[in-house]
């Protein structure tokens, strides 16, 4: 067996996710002989050097990917096409190009047409994260016991997909395979819609505080506080997710809106059974997650 899974692992973007991959790869060992990190901004470059989770830090994206046998894009999904145009001429034949983006249909749409011959695309999405961003926010244990969804591209090399699966297993994750369309629907309901609701409810409460000139937010109880954690997430990342998972997100929002109207109707007409049933369902789902150690 080879000493390392990859000789040269290049991370394009080393915020929460990219820096956690680097930290976890270092901590686990045997994953990459050399870790190269690319960041655009000079301040981040200096900070990444200081943090020391990469062997090489490179300001030029093209130079960063040269000679890499695995490149992982860890930037907001709206930046993919631009990044790909810069790196494509420098990708080595035999290289595996993967990513950590939260949408998958758009990633395949933006990367596949620019893929050089001999480079394999293996899109992936770690279902792990926090509301924090930037290279200081990452930690080696982030992917431990969390799912990673791989969405292999039609006609892609199964051996390349297996190497990316192996990478994530070695970082501590459980790997599932899914087509991109199913992935986008699943994450629209479990991740993207909850964020949309959190951003919205915070705005609604803020408007109310202004209107009543009362400190509504000062008395925020724990339910609201939980929403504010989610709503404090990174602006660029979430703008790009919403714009790049538009259809699935709008479909889930329409279903949610219908269901919330049904509950509103039950409240209006005093239908206690209906209300109780909805609350019980929520409790059941939470219990299920706790039993599976996902909450
Ligand atoms: N934050 C989270 O909880 C999770 C995020 N993801 C996905 O992972 C990716 C990275 O997210 P995070 O690490 O959380 O974001 P982050 O904001 O912590 O890091 C992103 C990094 O990319 C850099 N960047 C942005 N545009 C760039 C460009 N055009 N060229 C080069 N660098 C650029 C930023 O300066 C930043 O350092 C995103 O696609 C996101 O959707 C996936 C799972 C969880
Ligand atoms: O912090 C949270 O609650 C998250 O939901 C983290 C997260 C954000 C984006 C993803 O694509 C996956 C996980």
Image: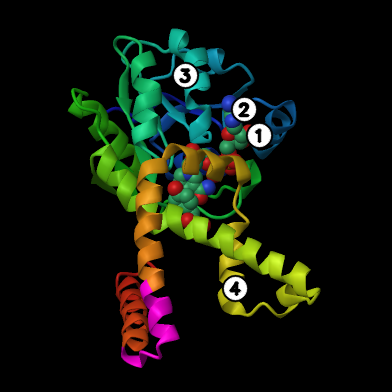
Residue 106: image quadrant is: top left
Label 2, secondary structure: give it. Answer: loop
Q: Is residue 259 magenta?
A: no
What is the magenta range?
262-273
Residue 230 visible, this angle: no
Q: Are marks 3 and 4 in contact (CB under 8 Å)?
A: no
Note whether ligand 1 is within 8 Å of mark 2. yes
Residue topped by disc 3: 84
Q: Are marks 1 and 2 in contact (CB under 8 Å)?
A: yes
Return the disc, 1 or 2, that comes first in the chain's sequence: 2
Q: 258 or 136: which is nearer to us?
A: 258
Residue topped by disc 4: 224
Q: In the figure, is residue 236 to the left or right of 4?
A: right
Residue at the far front in the pictured view? 269
Q: Quadrant of the N terminus?
A: top left
State whether residue 58 is above or below residue 239.
Answer: above
Residue topped by disc 1: 48
Observer-side mark, 3 or 2, equals: 3
């Amino acid at each position: 067996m080879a000493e390392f899974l990859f000789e040269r692992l290049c991370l394009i973007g080393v915020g929460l996710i990219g820096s956690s991959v680097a930290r976890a790869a270092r901590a686990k060992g045997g994953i990459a002989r050399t870790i190269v990190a690319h960041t655009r901004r000079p301040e981040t470059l200096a900070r990444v050097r200081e943090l020391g989770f990469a062997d090489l830090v490179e300001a030029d994206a093209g130079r960063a990917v040269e000679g890499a046998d695995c490149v992982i894009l860890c930037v907001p999904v709206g930046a993919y096409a631009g990044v790909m145009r810069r790196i494509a001429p420098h990708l080595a034949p035999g290289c595996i190009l993967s990513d950590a983006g939260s949408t998958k249909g758009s990633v395949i749409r933006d990367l596949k047409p620019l893929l050089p011959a001999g480079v394999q695309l293996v899109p992936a999405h770690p279902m792990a994260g926090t509301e924090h961003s930037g290279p200081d926010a990452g930690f080696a244990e982030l992917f431990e016991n969390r799912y990673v969804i791989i969405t292999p591209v039609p006609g892609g090399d199964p051996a390349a997909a297996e190497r990316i699966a192996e990478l994530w297993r070695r970082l501590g994750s459980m790997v599932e395979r899914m087509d991109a369309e199913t992935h986008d629907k699943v994450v629209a309901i479990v991740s993207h819609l909850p964020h949309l609701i959190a951003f919205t409810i915070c705005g609604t409460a803020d408007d109310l505080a202004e209107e009543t000139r009362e400190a509504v937010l000062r008395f925020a109880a724990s339910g609201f506080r939980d929403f504010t954690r989610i709503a404090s997430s990174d602006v660029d990342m979430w703008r790009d997710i919403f714009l790049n998972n538009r259809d699935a997100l709008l479909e889930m929002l329409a279903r949610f809106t219908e269901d919330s109207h049904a509950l509103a109707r039950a409240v209006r007409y005093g239908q206690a059974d209906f209300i109780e049933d909805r609350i019980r369902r929520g409790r059941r789902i939470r219990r299920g997650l706790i039993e599976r150690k996902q909450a």
